[in-house]
Image (cartoon, rainbow, N blue to C red):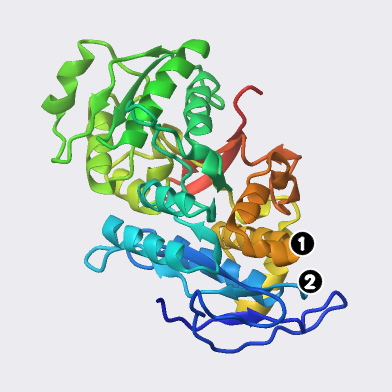
Amino acid sequence: MLAAVVVLLSAALSACGGASATQTRKTPTAKTKRPGPPFVDIYAGLPLRGPLAKQGRAVWKGIELARDNARIHDSVHLIFKRPLNDAGRKNGDDNLALTEKNAIAVSMDPHAVYYIGDLSSAATNISLPILSAAGIAQITPGDAYIAPASGQPGAVSLADKLLPLLPDYRVQAAADMQFFAKIPKQPACTRVTVVTESDPESAELAKLMSTDAKSDGIQPLVPLALTTKAATAATYETPFKGQTPCGIVIAGSAVKPAAAFARTIHSLFPQALILGTSGLCNSRWTKATAKGWTPAVDRLLWCTSPTWPLDQYDNSDNFTTLYRKTYHSNPSTYALYGYEAANLGIAMLGTLGTAGEDRETVRSNLLDPGVSDSFQYANLKGNTSSLSSYAVYNISPKSAEPAFYLTLTPGH
């Protein structure tokens, strides 16, 4: 049984408003019976250490903000559990054994009906099968890639058991190729190579990019595998066989080898555009990559991301005002997504009332195709859906930080 300090949204939160009441209690056992409205538990699985800790903590702050400002019907009490850390102690990378342990513990809580997380696709691919088998609704403000079903008889994909708040890898692949076909203020690039890590998501991205490239008039060159060792010119010069690429996509999240590779490619092909996918669209990669570059870094180095700066979201001002009033600091985009994920659960469970005790009822409502219409921040400014678009970031020549440049919506 998981011990946790919890916050109870009580019947004091009536339709006409009221302050949330807090109390500490232990999770009731399956045999515990309580008179009156049911208690249902809401969990979050997030990285609280390592490279994604900043995003994980931001998501939790957004969840807390939604929890503390909730207005729900008094037919159900929502219990928000402490966030479950899914990152290791040593370096903060994914700890899949810990993720599995967390998911099993949640599935065994008879009151658990709603799970927010995880952020990395590796962690979600561990938690989703366990929570799905238990009938628990899962929403993710993180990477939405779910591994395709295996070729074994009876194997099924679990992608339709997860509600993502971010656009998936198919949108990313199409947007990355669209970038090379419609490069801002530059001629289209028609010879592009994709360099991948050995993980399934990078391989799937490369395959989809090859398909999208042809429809964009791009000739995809032979894909390369990104070595974890320090890249040298000889390592990568031979595979191009005299074909000079005008564009290179680096798909993955391993900062050091990806940065070493990008610097080497820049030395080999000084005019080639280098584009990092979402796992590399951060200052750790861009700063490591830009070392020793000429000022042309702002023209040649790019990255794409499923998230935008907060001010690019429609009606984000109200969220920012509430966040600043509560925390006396500025929110990040991930705080917005945590707030959105929690608010959706609160609104849905408040509507379901006593039916919110039933896991399958909660999950079927969450996965209803029309549920995304209830997202308060689903659209970007200009009425553009954030689920069908991708953000392109340019690299500042002064700070080497990613700076939002434009939005790409494949098919438009």
Please tell me which residue lies in front, 270 or 261. Answer: 261
Ranked by sequence position, the earlier of labels 1 and 2 is: 2
Classify 10 Å Cα crowding around label 1: few (below 14), some (14-19), many (20 and above): some
Q: Is residue 299 visible?
A: yes
Please tell me which residue lies in front, 183 or 365. Answer: 365
Residue beneath the point at 43% across and 33% down = 156
Residue 356 falls in image quadrant: bottom right
Q: Is residue 330 visible?
A: no
Q: Secondary structure at mark 2?
A: loop
Q: Position of residue 401 (x, y in %)?
A: 44, 51
What residue is disc 2 on? 73
Q: Quadrant of the C terminus?
A: top right
Q: Quadrant of the N terminus?
A: bottom left
User: As displayed, is residue 407 above or below residue 336?
Assistant: above
Residue beneath the point at 70% across and 83% down = 20
Query: Mark on residue 351?
Result: 1
Residue beneath the point at 15% across and 17% down = 238
Q: Amino acid at mark 2?
A: His
Please give left or right for residue 151 compared with residue 362 in the image. Answer: left
Q: Position of residue 56 (x, y in %)?
A: 45, 63
